[in-house]
Each structure stands twice: as C-alpha cells, then as structure tokens.
Amino acid sequence: MGIRARRAAKKTDASSRRNQVSAQDLMDAAVRLLGAHRSVSTLSLREIAREAGIAPNSFYRHFRDVDELTVALIDQAGRALRGIIREARQRLSMERSAIRTSVEAFMEQVDAEEKHIQVLLREMSTGSDAFRQAVERELNYFEDELRDELERMEKLTGHASYQPALTAKAITRLVVAMGASAVEQTPEQRAELIDQTVVMIRMIMEGSQSLAKKKRK
C-alpha cells in the first residue's frame, strides 16, 4: 500500500471512530473532566468534544449544547442511583435495617467511578435554574418512591407516618445534604456521618409516627 493510500486509510479510520462516538461517550467524557469542585455546567463544548476525540461540530449530532448534555447526565445519575438503592434493599438481611442499607448504598456512590452522586450534588448547588430543576425532578422521584415505601410499611406493620409525602421529603433532603458533606471526608469520618444520618432518619421516622398517633386521637 502506498503512502497516499495509507494516509487515506488512516483518515477513513479516524472518521469512522468519530462517527461511532455516542451520546454516552460524550457524557462519559464530560464526567472525566470534572475536578473536585467543578460543575459540568462549567465545561465547554470544545473541551468535551476534545476529550471524546471528535470534532466540535460532531457534538451536535447528539446534544444541542452542554446544557442538554448536563440535564441528560443528571437524569442518568438519578436512574442509576434509584437502581442501586433498590438492589441494596433486596440484599437486606435480618440483622440490617432498610435505613442503614439505603444510606450506605447512597454514600458508596459518592466515590463511585461513574460519579453519579457528585454530578447531582454539584448541579444542585452550582448549576443553572434548568440544572437545578433537573436535580429537583430526580429528588422528587426518590421522594415518591420513599412515600410509597412508607405507605406499604404502614399496611404491613400498622405504623402510620404523618403526611408520608412530607416525611419522605425530609428524609431525602437530609440524606442529600449529608452526602454533600461526605464528598471529601476520610473513611473514618464517612462512617461516623453514616451513623449520624441513620440516627437522624430514625428521629424523623419516630417523630412522624408520633404525630400520626396524636392525629388519630
């Protein structure tokens, strides 16, 4: 094969690779660029395209702009985390509470390679209104699932919660706030934080159940 033919083949291979870059590849590239305190919303389109190995114009085959990519990342993070917590609950043993298992599953994801939780936490505090709305939507999903769980437990145990939706919101917002504190903590500090979070959730639960009993009287 001559020099020109080899160059043409290389160009064809490079072009083929660029065409094979998916929306997920671009999202993964954005996450790789995140630093300890950097939000996805601060990344430029060119940075992400360069990290993914494509020309900037190829970015538009998958997303209108970085904003749309960020919202997609937040949605993906929420879906992944919900799945992780569901799996954690399915692995429950008689010795472990659902509260501790769920909190530990959440905290484990703070340092996970995919950085799902970190994306949610960063965009919640530093993102634009659109990003914060996307995070809020994911938190609402968690709250809805937890509310359903509280109502299911009431049928099984007879222990009612006062305003289950509000109780679920209090627990969800507490866990997210504690997760934000855990990002840069040592393993020892993280273990203590988990213990504190579990106790605080139990305090919310017991308070909610106490209010429900008073309401019935």
Image (cartoon, helix red, strand yellow):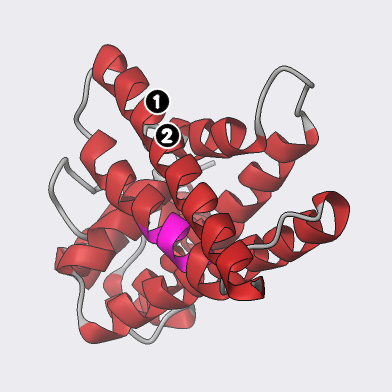
How far, Cα to Cα, is label 1 from label 2? Answer: 6 Å
Local SS, label 1:
helix
Image spot of residue 114 (x, y percent): 45, 42
Q: Is residue 122 visible?
A: yes
Task: Identify the residue under disc 2.
Answer: 199
Image spot of residue 208 (x, y percent): 52, 60
Q: Amino acid at mark 1?
A: Asp
Side of 151 relative to 138 (left or right): right
Q: Mark 1 vs mark 2: give the one in front.
A: 2
Q: Main secondary structure of the magenta part?
A: helix
Q: Residues within 10 Å of mark 2 (few under 14, many from 20)?
A: some
- Residue sitting at x 39%, y 29%: 194
Front residue of 217/126: it is: 217
Q: Residue 39's quadrant in the figure? A: bottom left
Please give the label number shown on residue 123.
Answer: none
Quadrant of image for the N terminus:
top right
Local SS, label 2:
helix
Please give the label number shown on residue 195.
Answer: 1
